[in-house]
Image (cartoon, grey):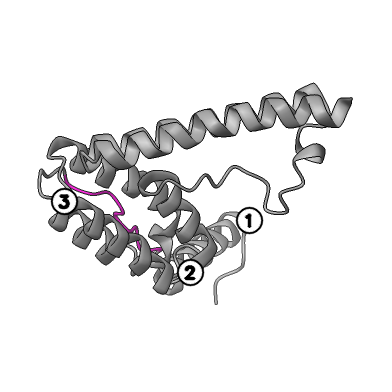
């Protein structure tokens, strides 16, 4: 029988460590990398379908905003009124699949494809919304950003000038109303 020397002990320790590492590698499941990116396309229907297919995987839910932007850009490449139903269907399907909430879906749709301004406070207590100059400025900037989103959706993606001009008119009326209300609330 061989005597256990330091050299043999080291070899035995090295072999058992390597065996342990090899067995650990075999039993550790490898994380599957999911490709959530969309291929470029000029066809809005195919981009929407591809996105919804990717969204079936929970790992891709975080890509919703990027996918929505890609769909919007695709629609702007071929603006027409029928794009509205594709975009509405896409947003609704994402909500049904749990990618976004129903409230987020309503907000997204209205911000881009409807004249309703979602930046206004829900409680319509305009005095509190414009109580100080910073709050008023923030609300004005939010409304301005939303008008840009409506321009992107209504004009850029749908080529719907009439609805955009309605939204633009409402925006102007809202600014006048907010200024008048701020003055009345302060006085």
Question: Where does the image place residue 186, in percent across and percent down from the top left?
Answer: 87, 26
SS at mark 3 in the image: helix
Confirm whether the magenta stretch covers residue 36.
yes
Q: Marks 3 and 1: which is nearer the front?
A: 3
Q: Place residue 80 in its image quadrant.
A: top left
Residue 67 visible in rendering: yes
Instruction: Check disc 3: other Cα within 10 Å, few if <14, some if 14-19, many if 20+.
Output: many
| Distance in Å between CA atoms under marks 1 and 2 | 27 Å
Quick one: label 3 or label 1, which is nearer the N terminus? 1
Q: Report the side of 117 relative to 115 (left or right).
A: right
Residue picked out by circle 3: 44
Q: Identify the image quadrant of the N terminus.
A: bottom right
Q: Is residue 146 visible?
A: no
Under circle 2, the secondary element is helix
Q: Is residue 92 above or below residue 124?
A: below
Q: Position of residue 158 (x, y in %)?
A: 22, 43
Q: Position of residue 151 (x, y in %)?
A: 35, 33
Please say if the residues under marks 1 and 2 sit with CB atoms less than 8 Å apart.
no
Region in magenta: 31-39
First of labels 1, 2 by sequence position: 1
Distance CA(mark 2)–CA(mark 3): 47 Å
* Residue at the spot 32% in from the left edge and 42% down from the top edge: 163
Nearest the viewer among 181 and 132 is 181
> Which one is in front in this view, the residue at disc 1 or the one at disc 2?
2
What residue is drawn where x is 62% and y is 44%?
A: 120
- In x, y percent, where is residue 6? 63, 56
Looking at the rendered structure, which numbered label has been put on residue 24? 2
Element class at badge 1 = helix
Q: Is residue 57 left or right of residue 11?
A: left
């Amino acid at each position: 029988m061989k005597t256990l020397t330091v050299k043999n002990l080291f070899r035995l320790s090295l072999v058992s460590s390597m065996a342990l590492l090899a067995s650990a590698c075999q039993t550790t499941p490898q994380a599957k990398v999911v490709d959530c990116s969309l291929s470029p396309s000029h066809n809005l229907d195919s981009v929407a379908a591809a996105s919804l297919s990717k969204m079936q995987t929970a790992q891709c839910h975080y890509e919703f905003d990027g996918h929505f932007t890609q769909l919007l850009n695709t629609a702007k490449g071929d603006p027409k009124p029928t794009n509205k139903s594709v975009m509405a269907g896409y947003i609704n399907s994402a909500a049904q699949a749990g990618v976004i909430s129903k409230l987020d879906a309503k907000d997204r749709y209205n911000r881009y494809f409807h004249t309703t301004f979602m930046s206004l406070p829900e409680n319509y207590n305009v005095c509190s919304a414009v109580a100080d100059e910073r709050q008023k400025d923030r609300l004005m900037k939010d409304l301005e950003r939303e008008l840009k989103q409506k321009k992107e959706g209504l004009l850029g993606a749908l080529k719907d000038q009439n609805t955009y001009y309605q939204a633009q008119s409402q925006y102007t009326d809202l600014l006048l109303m907010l200024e008048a209300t701020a003055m009345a609330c302060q006085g």
